[in-house]
Amino acid sequence: MPSYTEAELPLLTPGMTTSAAETRRLFAETRATAPLAKGLFGPVAIHHRDVVDLLRDRRLRGPGMDFARMSGIPDGSRAWARQEQILLFMEGDDHHRLRRLVSKAFTPRAVESLRPFTRATIARLVDAVVDEGHCDAVPMLCDPFPIPVICALVGVDADRWEDMSRWASDILLSLRLDAGQFLDRIESAQAELDDFITELIERRRAAPGDDLLSNLVSVEEEGDRLSPSELLSVVAMMLVAGTDTTRNQLSTVIHTFAEHPEQWALLRERPELTANAVEEAIRWHPATEALPRFAVEDIEIGGHLVPAGSVVILMSMSANHDTTALPGADTFDITRTAPDGWHLLTFGGGIHYCLGANLARLELQEAVAELATRFSTLTLDGAATLHPPGSPIGGYSSLPIRWV
Ligand code: HEM
């Protein structure tokens, strides 16, 4: 079998395109002509079938602590200790055990109970701008949206959400490839969050409430419980995993509707399509465009050998548009019914499948429903700016919109 390194394969690197539409076009051309592509670090899987299979292939593992090491987080630091207990960086039995315990506490019922609060949160943000007729959706709607919801989920009082927001922003720096440069900020935010949550845990132990932290404190399976340090890491994980993803995903959803006014009009006419519309919009432009993996053993992708040790990029943005897996995938259609066997890749797949997918869907459904109720038209009001190439999460850093 030819090694992918010696094969003539198209190159896909960050920064080759300047808009999401161009990226979709480039991926479509590449899928039509090649079984896989080459990227900056290694092979890039672009076909739906390959991405689905590789997410489940145990010969590949997640970014693990190699990512923390590469990004300059020193072993022994508080940031390192927290990342070691973040599900996405764990594998094998340790991952399985922590995921089971957290899933027991993070129940569909706990998520569903957040619906009215989530709707009130987005309604409050819309209230602040609606009379203006225009705004930059990123700072006014998307950025402030997820933190109060995560606070409500965890059981943090609403008056502390600004602290939580600051800690989230600083701890999120630990996901950058140059995280080492921000170590002081990351460590001090993590220390403040740890102190705050430790005190909250004591209060919840004494008087359990109806929130995730109370559930996490009491969750037990066959005598196994979360340790104090795991409890702190799980709260940090919820903040890290549930903030940037949701706010960026909301930005791409709004952008997609602004580019498809006829679909916005259809949604307003048929609000029962809201859940379907969200599913289609997150397929169209997933905030998590690419998922990194390490090959632990030699594997084959598209008839090419990929040697052990390679960094493999699973391009969910490309796979979500693969017309061989989803007929008409190149059209944005909120009435679509996906065929059997179709897997949406926006939330990943396999053992690391997004633990917050139900909450993320709920948040986006409530946001889209509120916006569709309040804005009879939704259009772009100037050029939208994507995050710089290579950012860990896709989406917009500026999104001027106008409505009537
Ligand atoms: C629209 C918003 C979201 C998107 C697009 C998203 C996407 C993803 C993706 C693609 C993964 C897998 C990454 C990989 O395999 O490399 C993931 C994992 C994860 N997500 Fe989400 N996510 C979102 C919101 C949330 C929320 C709201 C939470 C929790 C409050 C959350 C918690 C997690 C956790 C804990 C993991 C790691 C699971 C594991 O490794 O076992 N996510 N997410």
Image (cartoon, rainbow, N blue to C red):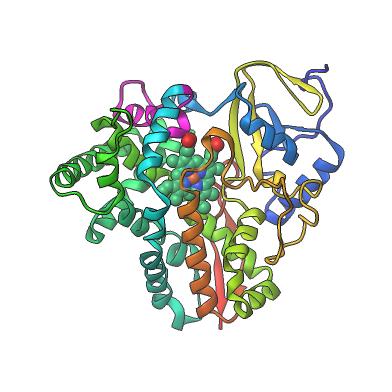
Outermost residue to the right? 33
The vertical placement of 99 against 377, above or below, is above
Which residue is at the front of the view, 116 or 376?
A: 116
Q: Is residue 392 visible?
A: no
On the rendered image, what quadrant is the N terminus found in? top right
Residue at figure coordinates x 45%, y 29% from the top left: 96
Where residue 110 appears, x then y in whole percent? 36, 54
* The residue stretch that appears in magenta: 72-92
Which residue is at the front of the view, 343 or 145?
A: 343
Residue at figure coordinates x 29%, y 45% from the top left: 215
On the rendered image, what quadrant is the C terminus found in? bottom right
Please tell me in which quadrant of the rendered image residue 191 appears.
top left
In magenta stretch: residue 300: no
Where residue 93 appears, x then y in whole percent? 44, 22
In magenta stretch: residue 73: yes
Residue at figure coordinates x 65%, y 59% from the top left: 280
| Relative horizontal placement of residue 260, taking residue 397 as reference (left or right) | right
Please tell me in which quadrant of the rendered image residue 228 appears.
top left
Outermost residue to the front? 222
| Relative horizontal placement of residue 80, taking residue 297 as reference (left or right) | left
| Relative horizontal placement of residue 70, taking residue 213 as reference (left or right) | right
Residue at figure coordinates x 54%, y 79% from the top left: 375
Where residue 179 appears, x then y in whole percent? 42, 34
